Image (cartoon, rainbow, N blue to C red):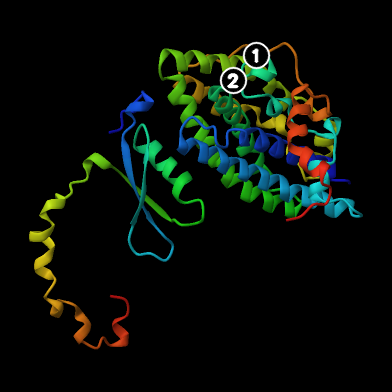
Amino acid sequence: MDRTPYLLHLADNALILGQRNAEWCGHGPVLEEDIALANMSLDLIGQARLLYQEVAKDRGQDCTEDSLAYFRDTAAFRNYTLLELPHSSPVVGYGHAEPDYGVTIVRNFLYSALMVLVWEALQQSKDKTLAAIAEKSFKETRYHLRHSRDWLVRLGDGTDESHRRMQEAVDYLYGFTQEFWTRHPVEEEAVQAGIGVDVSGLRVDWDEIVDSALAEATLRKPAEGGYVSQGKFGHHSEHLDYVLHEMQSLARAHPGATW
Amino acid sequence: MNEPTKQLKDWPLWEVFVRSKQGLEHKHCGSLHAADARQALDMARDVYTRRQEGVSIWVVQSSQIVANRPDEKEELFEPSADKIYRHPTFYDIPEEVGHM
């Protein structure tokens, strides 16, 4: 089977969240958090690189990790929509959006709660390289979960204002996690080949992680329903265009540049 | 010490000690602000062990460290200046003794 669509889904998730979180570089709420976020961005971009390199190996010719990151357009990306959203609440216009650390933390928490389970399971993948990447990523993601869960509880169970903003962030982002559980032919094919993990089967464990953290943070879990995003099908929000434009513009203005 | 401080401006200062892979002891490597001990440990990890410096971290609130007064320097430290015989440089140390 062609494993590249599955690897691209995993890689795009890591790259887009890594790029998003890197926006805090130099703007973090405190110096220590600024560095922590940059560290985690580099973990994610490192995961994406390893996966893109595998895709490039399979595709051959002039496909490289750089061509995959910098020269694919929006519709070719297969990341969850959750990961491309800006660090601000839904009602703020993009151009003027003040980043909200609550949104950053809630997103990192919801995603890393999933990915600790995904990477843990992928260590059993029949694809030995993917299993090795999973082993490395699992350790990194455990720290990402520890970091975001810690802040989720601190801010949720913090002051009136931090509690209110965290609840808003949870209400805003939670619906986007429904995309985790929807089926996609690429994932199903990877599961059948013994390479991938059945994400919908991780739901119970994910709920447990999320429920216990939200309870500790005195936050309410929103009801499900409504729009189910389809980023992994290539149907993205308009926000991904901005992310990609910023990330890709340099490489496109100076193709093949080195330093 | 385990009750987090909520206001950012009130976050206490912590001193960070890291033991490296080769090192036998924790060495002071800097300080940072954090709301409580657990957060100080995490932040120390992020700020001071990014280049594989560490295998173990200690943090202690700076206010808990007792230090001598700078003006006590003469009486505390100068008396040892002329007692070079306290350095074990006059002995040959057998190889099998190893690290001292």
Q: Which chain letter goes with mark 1?
A: A
Q: CA distance from mark 1 to mark 2?
A: 8 Å
Q: Is residue B51 above or below residue A1?
A: below
Picture quadrant of residue A232: top right
Residue B55 shows in the view: yes
Instruction: Name the residue type under label 2.
Output: Glu
Horizontal side, residue B39 vs residue A108: left or right? left
Q: Residue at x 70, y 51 (%)?
A: A131
Q: Which chain letter goes with mark 2?
A: A
Residue identified by numbered label 1:
A92
Viewer-nearest residue: A181 or A245: A245
Count the marks: how many?
2
Q: Residue at x 75, y 13 (%)?
A: A227
Q: Neighbour class for label 2 at 10 Å: few (<14), some, many (≥20)?
A: few
Q: Position of residue B96 (x, y in %)?
A: 31, 85
1 and 2 marks in contact (CB < 8 Å):
yes
Q: Position of residue A187 (x, y in %)?
A: 80, 35
Q: Residue at x 67, y 44 (%)?
A: A45
Viewer-nearest residue: A61 or A27: A27
Residue identified by numbered label 2:
A98
Q: Is residue A50 above or below residue A110?
A: below
Horizontal side, residue A223 vs residue A253: left or right? left
Q: Position of residue A256 (x, y in %)?
A: 83, 51
Horizontal side, residue B61 vs residue A194: left or right? left
Instruction: Name the residue type under label 1.
Output: Val
Check disc 1 and report its element: helix, strand or loop. loop
Please state, as top left, top right, bottom left or bottom right, where the C terminus of chain A lies in the image: bottom right
Picture quadrant of residue A10: top right
Q: Position of residue A125 (x, y in %)?
A: 73, 48
Q: Is residue B25 above or below residue B34?
A: below
Check disc 2 and report its element: helix, strand or loop. loop
Viewer-nearest residue: B73 or A37: B73
